[in-house]
Structure formats: structure tokens, C-alpha cells
């Protein structure tokens, strides 16, 4: 019986045509299965056979790497000599075009050079890499070192010094345009510390409602601010600024009214509030997010970015989170008509403490 089953299985081993029935669990090898063709015959490259061709390929490779350096430096020069002029569309086009062309050339030439090096000059034979158990033992590690040495020898990384050095140069030069572009994030013609230290607040400027975007709402009377309420406030003359959003980002303020007996005001700052109404910068002193959440019962302001909390009753000091200094307070009072006005600008820079350290 066992013999019969064996024979049957043997017979089925070469079947696989439609209509053939095989018992469940029996492996069937199709008689027309495609055989493993193996590797195609190795063909020597022209650079393997002809030393002149090899030299010429080497020249192409290092020329491409040098071209990459030229592209990187070109992008830096384009950044310097084609600056962006505000309002000049042509200047913006030339700037982005030349910087872009330089960076494209830099990256493309490194890529093409590396591919050409690999295809034309590095060793071109097929090899089989056996898998080994993990972790590696000492002989394996020694073998790895040997592989590196063979790779180094075959790629010519050490021997072809011009190719190697030009590649190193290209890789060092390539990040330069990116670093240069960072300069564009800083103000071009003014000291950034001075720029951030001064806002549009000044003596007598009325506090007005922030209506979002470029909008400025009506001026706020002290009588409008009830205990527990909070106002998002901008200078009344904000819409006269050249760069409204830039100015707003620095000058925006939160206005709250507390019971005056709850305020802990040091000597010298007692007149910075008006009848329990206090105004603090809305720009978080950690990294500048808007501190937009006010908890009426605890009188805490919360920054949603990294959860810094500020105590409004105690000069907006930090009570939790990564911020390192209180929110700057805007000294306020009222004018003859009962509108809230600023007594002066902020007395310290608003926003992240980084700027204060540069004072
Ligand atoms: S920006 Fe406010 S806590 Fe980080």
C-alpha cells in the first residue's frame, strides 16, 4: 500500500496539465517549468580592455565632480549678486533661477559622476555573498575589513586620488548654498535685535481689537473690559504699517481684567495696569507661538505649542513649561475719553529669549 502511494506521488511529480488530479498535500512539479537560466555570460567593458578608455572615463568622472563644485559656488554667487528686491518680480525670478540652476548642477553632477564611476571604473564581476549568522564572530569581522579593503582597491578610491578628492570637494561644497540661503531668513538691512525690540506701541496709541489678518477693530474702552474677559489686541494704527503682518506679529497683546486685589505688582510697575486691567505680549517667550489660551479661574495663560504656563496675577511669570522668562507687560492707562492707551512701547524685547540674550 505504501509502495503504491510512493509510485503514485512519483508519477505526479512531473504532471501539472489541466485535468490531472493530485491527492491533497501532494507536490506537483510542472513538466514545463522554466529552468533557472543562471547568470548571463560576463562581458568585459571597454574600460576593462582599454587603458585609454579607462583614463578617459576617469577624466569624465572628476570633471563632473568639479562641475558640481562650480554649481555649488555658482549658487552662492548667484545668491549674492542677484538679491531679492522687495516688489521687483524680475529680481525674484533671476534670484530663484540662478540659485536653482547652481544647486541643480551641483547635485546632478555629483549623481551622474558617482553613477559613471560605478558603471565604468569600479570592478564589474559577479560575486556571491553568503549569509552568515548574527552576531558576527572575529573571522567575520576580519572578513568585513578585507571586503572593505578589496572594495577600496577595486573602486580605486585610494588610488584614484583626483576622483576621490574631487568627490570629497563636491560633497563639502554642495551644502554651501543651503547654508547661504539661511541668511535670507534674517532681516537684510537692519539689526534683528533692534528690529524685534521695538514694536508699534508708543505713548498714547489706543488699544484696538484684533479682527484677524490685517484687520483692526474698534478701540477698546476700559469700561468694555469686564472681569474674566480677554481681548486680543493690536495697536489702533496698525493698518498704517508698511508690513502689517510683521508689525502685528510683534505687537499683538492679550488684555485681561482681574480683581485688582489679586494682582501682585512690584514697586515701579504698579501703574502699568489700569483698575485691574493688564496687557501682556501674546508672543511666547519660548519659541514665539501665540499664547492664546486663558484660564479664567486660575488666571493662567497657556501656550499650546509646548505647554508653557504664565501666571497673569504675578507679572506673567512662568509657572510651568520650557519658557524661561515672563511675557513682557505693556504699560497701559486710559485717555480723556476712557479709551485704553499704551504708556510706552514694551520695555523689553518680545518673543523668544534668544533675542534678549543678544541685547
Ligand atoms: S512656544 Fe510657547 S511653550 Fe514653546
Image (spheres, helix red, strand yellow):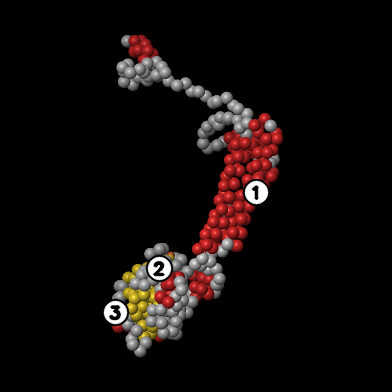
Residue 252, relative to residue 117: is it above or below? below
* Quadrant (top left/top right/bottom left/bottom right) for the C terminus: bottom right
In x, y percent, where is residue 268?
44, 85
**SS for dot 2:** loop
Q: Which residue is mark 1?
A: 66
Residue sitting at 64 percent across and 31 percent down?
46
Q: Give me the C-alpha separation between circle 2 and circle 1.
A: 47 Å
Residue 124, relative to residue 236: is it above or below? above
The answer to whether mark 2 and mark 1 are in CB contact below 8 A is: no
**SS for dot 1:** helix
Q: Which residue is mark 2?
A: 290
Q: Nearer the viewer, residue 131 or 216?
A: 216
Residue sitting at 31 percent across and 20 percent down?
24
The residue sitting at the bottom extreme is: 336
Instruction: Give the mark nearest the N terminus, 2 or 1.
Output: 1
Judge depth for marks 1 and 3 and give the one in front: 1
Amino acid at each position: 500500500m505504501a509502495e503504491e502511494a510512493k509510485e503514485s506521488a512519483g508519477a505526479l511529480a512531473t504532471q501539472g496539465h489541466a485535468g490531472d488530479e493530485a491527492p491533497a498535500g501532494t507536490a506537483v512539479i510542472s513538466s514545463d517549468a522554466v529552468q533557472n537560466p543562471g547568470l548571463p555570460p560576463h562581458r568585459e567593458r571597454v574600460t576593462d580592455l582599454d587603458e585609454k578608455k579607462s583614463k578617459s572615463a576617469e577624466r569624465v568622472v572628476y570633471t563632473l565632480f568639479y562641475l558640481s563644485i562650480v554649481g555649488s559656488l555658482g549658487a552662492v554667487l548667484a545668491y549674492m549678486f542677484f538679491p531679492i528686491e522687495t516688489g521687483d518680480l524680475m529680481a525674484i525670478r533671476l534670484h530663484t533661477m540662478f540659485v536653482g540652476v547652481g544647486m541643480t548642477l551641483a547635485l546632478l553632477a555629483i549623481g551622474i559622476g558617482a553613477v559613471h564611476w560605478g558603471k565604468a571604473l569600479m570592478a564589474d564581476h559577479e560575486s556571491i555573498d553568503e549569509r552568515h549568522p548574527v552576531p558576527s564572530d572575529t573571522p567575520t569581522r576580519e572578513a568585513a575589513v578585507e571586503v572593505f579593503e578589496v572594495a577600496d582597491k577595486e573602486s580605486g578610491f585610494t588610488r584614484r586620488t583626483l576622483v576621490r578628492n574631487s568627490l570629497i570637494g563636491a560633497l563639502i561644497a554642495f551644502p554651501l548654498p543651503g547654508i547661504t540661503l539661511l541668511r535670507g531668513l534674517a532681516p537684510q538691512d537692519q539689526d534683528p535685535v533692534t528690529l524685534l525690540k521695538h514694536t508699534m506701541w508708543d505713548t498714547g496709541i489706543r488699544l484696538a481689537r484684533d479682527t484677524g489678518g490685517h484687520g483692526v477693530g474698534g478701540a477698546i474702552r476700559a469700561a468694555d473690559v469686564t472681569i474674566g474677559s480677554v481681548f486680543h489686541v493690536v495697536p489702533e494704527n496698525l493698518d498704517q504699517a508698511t508690513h502689517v503682518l510683521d508689525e502685528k506679529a510683534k505687537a499683538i497683546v492679550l488684555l485681561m481684567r482681574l480683581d485688582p486685589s489679586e494682582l501682585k505688582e512690584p514697586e515701579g510697575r504698579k501703574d502699568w495696569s489700569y483698575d485691574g486691567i493688564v496687557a501682556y505680549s501674546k508672543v511666547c517667550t519660548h519659541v514665539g507661538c501665540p499664547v492664546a489660551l486663558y484660564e479664567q479661574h486660575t488666571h493662567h495663560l497657556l501656550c499650546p505649542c509646548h505647554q508653557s504656563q504664565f501666571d497673569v496675577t504675578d507679572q506673567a511669570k512662568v509657572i510651568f513649561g520650557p519658557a524661561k522668562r515672563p511675557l513682557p507687560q505693556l504699560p497701559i492707562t486710559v485717555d480723556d475719553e476712557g479709551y485704553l492707551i499704551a504708556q510706552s512701547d514694551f520695555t523689553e524685547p518680545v518673543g523668544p529669549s534668544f533675542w534678549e540674550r543678544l541685547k
